[in-house]
């Protein structure tokens, strides 16, 4: 019952936000005011406020109360097409920076190995990059590649900023994707730290493959984690 009361307060406040009752940086009623409105202990309102902060709706000022967080600029992202994330963002005029988080050999993973079409005893490496736009970390790119396809990946991986640029240096220039999987999740402790987001900010997870169009061989298995509050996703082809 207590949890239902908190959810009711959360639902009511979100509805008021959606209806435009509050604008960016407007102050919300105090805990005491809402406690009287709903005839509940103050702690119930506080818990509702804390959840709304975790969801990215509110921010607090010590001794002053809670305020509506300004909306972030939504970045249009085409999820289809043959150009890289870096090319799409730079073409759209965003200030994109990429931080390479490292290259490491992974343990056997049936899904990844099947996508790359390599045997269990093959060495597969993960190259991780953090994407930062206008100073805000907004995406985590994990690329998995087989050493048999890229023999120097163990040495080169730590310096890769764009996988497509790396492929071009290796002689691969035309790409296909056979399938993509989309899901929604919430951030782990590591993802919250890297993406600087609250626990209940949804993450948009895109898993796909990259195939050399000429040889029809698998080049990469990709898992990209986007901050759900930062993008508008476009599914039409480029």
Image (tube, grey):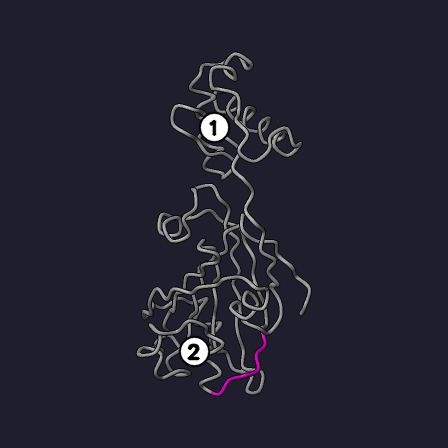
Dot 2 alpha-carbon crowd within 10 angstroms: few under 14, some 14 to 19, many 20 or more: some
Q: Which residue occupies 59% across, 60% down?
A: 77
Q: Nearer the viewer, mark 1 or mark 2?
A: 1
Mark 2 residue element: loop
Toward which corner of the image does residue 26 lie, by quadrant? top right
Magenta span main SS: loop
Q: Which residue occupies 49% across, 49% down?
A: 185
The x, y position of residue 43, in whole percent, is: 42, 19
Dot 1 alpha-carbon crowd within 10 angstroms: few under 14, some 14 to 19, many 20 or more: many
For residue 74, side relative to residue 52 (left or right): right
The x, y position of residue 98, in whole percent, is: 42, 65
- Name the one closer to the observer, 60 or 190: 60
The x, y position of residue 192, in whole percent, is: 39, 48
Toward which corner of the image does residue 142 lie, by quadrant? bottom left
Q: Which residue occupies 52% across, 21% down?
A: 29
Vertical side of 112 occupied by 122: above or below: below
Q: CA distance from mark 1 to mark 2?
A: 53 Å
Question: In the rendering, which numbered label is found on residue 66?
Answer: 1
Q: Which residue occupies 59% across, 31% down?
A: 14
Q: Are marks 1 and 2 in contact (CB under 8 Å)?
A: no
The x, y position of residue 53, in whole percent, is: 46, 34
Question: In the rendering, which numbered label is found on residue 215?
Answer: none
Vertical side of 135 occupied by 186: above or below: above
Residue 136 magenta: no
Toward which corner of the image does residue 183 lie, by quadrant? bottom right
For residue 55, side relative to residue 122 (left or right): right
Q: Which of the marked residues, 1 or 2, is nearer the chain's N terminus?
A: 1
Q: Which residues are magenta?
A: 171-176
Question: In the rendering, which numbered label is found on residue 118?
Answer: 2
Mark 1 residue element: strand
């Amino acid at each position: 019952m207590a949890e239902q009361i908190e959810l009711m307060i959360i639902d009511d406040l979100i509805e008021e936000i959606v209806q435009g009752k509050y604008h960016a940086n407007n102050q919300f009623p105090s805990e005491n005011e809402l406690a009287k409105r709903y005839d509940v202990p103050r702690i119930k309102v506080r818990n509702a406020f804390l959840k709304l902060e975790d969801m990215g709706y509110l921010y607090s000022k010590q001794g002053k109360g809670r305020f509506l967080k300004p909306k972030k600029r939504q970045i249009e992202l085409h999820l289809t097409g043959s150009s890289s994330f870096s090319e799409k963002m730079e073409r759209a005029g965003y200030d994109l920076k990429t931080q390479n988080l490292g290259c490491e050999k992974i343990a056997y993973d049936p899904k990844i190995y099947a996508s790359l079409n390599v045997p269990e005893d093959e060495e597969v490496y993960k190259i991780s990059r953090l994407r930062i736009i206008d100073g805000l970390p907004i995406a985590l790119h994990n690329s998995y590649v087989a050493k048999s396809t890229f023999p120097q990946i163990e040495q080169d991986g730590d310096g890769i900023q764009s996988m497509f640029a790396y492929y071009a240096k290796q002689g691969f220039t035309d790409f296909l994707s056979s399938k993509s999987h989309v899901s929604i999740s919430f951030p782990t402790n590591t993802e919250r730290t890297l993406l600087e987001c609250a626990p209940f900010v949804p993450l948009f997870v895109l898993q796909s493959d990259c195939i050399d169009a000429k040889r029809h061989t698998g080049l990469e298995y990709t898992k990209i984690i986007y901050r759900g509050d930062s993008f508008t996703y476009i599914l039409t082809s480029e």
